[in-house]
Image: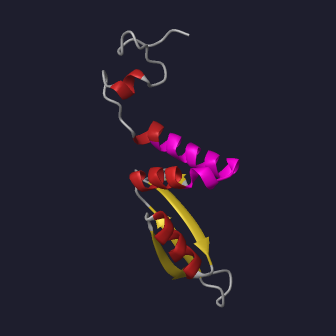
Amino acid sequence: MFCSKREKRLQAEVSQIDPRVLERFADAVKIGRVYGPFKGSTPETPRWRYVTQSEAGVRQLFEVLSPWLGEVKQEQFRRAIAHFDAKFTRVEPGSIAHLHAPGVSAGNPRRKKVV
């Protein structure tokens, strides 16, 4: 999972040598697709990639996989999503999301909370 630094893109990716594993995964989660083959570490071992490249797709994938992910992978998802939200998500002043934004007082959405 990563948030691109140059593009407005949130992406999740899994690489494997056997495309059947990734195709089965893509069929199970109903999000993303499998690409490849790509050059592997040796000519005899091409790599395949499962990728979902949309913000909605990554969020949905996290929701689907979350119960089966360990703490490390859950944290990677959360960090990538939080980075994307901080960098690219615009919250309109006065919106419900704005009221929950860090540093905004619920009493007056235009007033910063004094800590």
**Residue 67 position within the rendered picture, expressed as x and y whole percent measured from the top left:** 60, 50
Magenta-colored segment: predominant secondary structure: helix
Q: Nearer the viewer, residue 61 or 40?
A: 61
Residue found 64% across the figure and 89% down from its top: 43
Which quadrant holds residue 33? Answer: bottom left
**Residue 17 position within the rendered picture, expressed as x and y whole percent measured from the top left:** 63, 80
Left or right of 40, for residue 107: left
Q: Nearer the viewer, residue 22 or 103?
A: 22
Q: Which residues are magenta?
A: 65-84
Please identify the residue farthest to the bottom as the structure is shown. Answer: 44
Which quadrant holds residue 44? Answer: bottom right
**Residue 75 position within the rendered picture, expressed as x and y whole percent measured from the top left:** 63, 45
Q: Name the quarter where the C terminus is drawn.
A: top right
Residue found 47% across the figure and 71% down from its top: 27
97 up-or-down from 4: above or below: above
Does residue 66 belong to the magenta stretch? Answer: yes
Residue found 49% across the figure and 23% down from its top: 102
Left or right of 65, for residue 52: left
61 up-or-down from 32: above or below: above
Here the colouring is secondary structure
Does residue 69 belong to the magenta stretch? Answer: yes
Q: Name the quarter where the N terminus is drawn.
A: bottom right
Left or right of 110, for residue 21: right
**Residue 66 position within the rendered picture, expressed as x and y whole percent measured from the top left:** 58, 50
Residue found 50% across the figure and 50% down from its top: 63
Left or right of 107, for residue 81: right
Which quadrant holds residue 30? Answer: bottom left
Report the number of numbered marks.
0
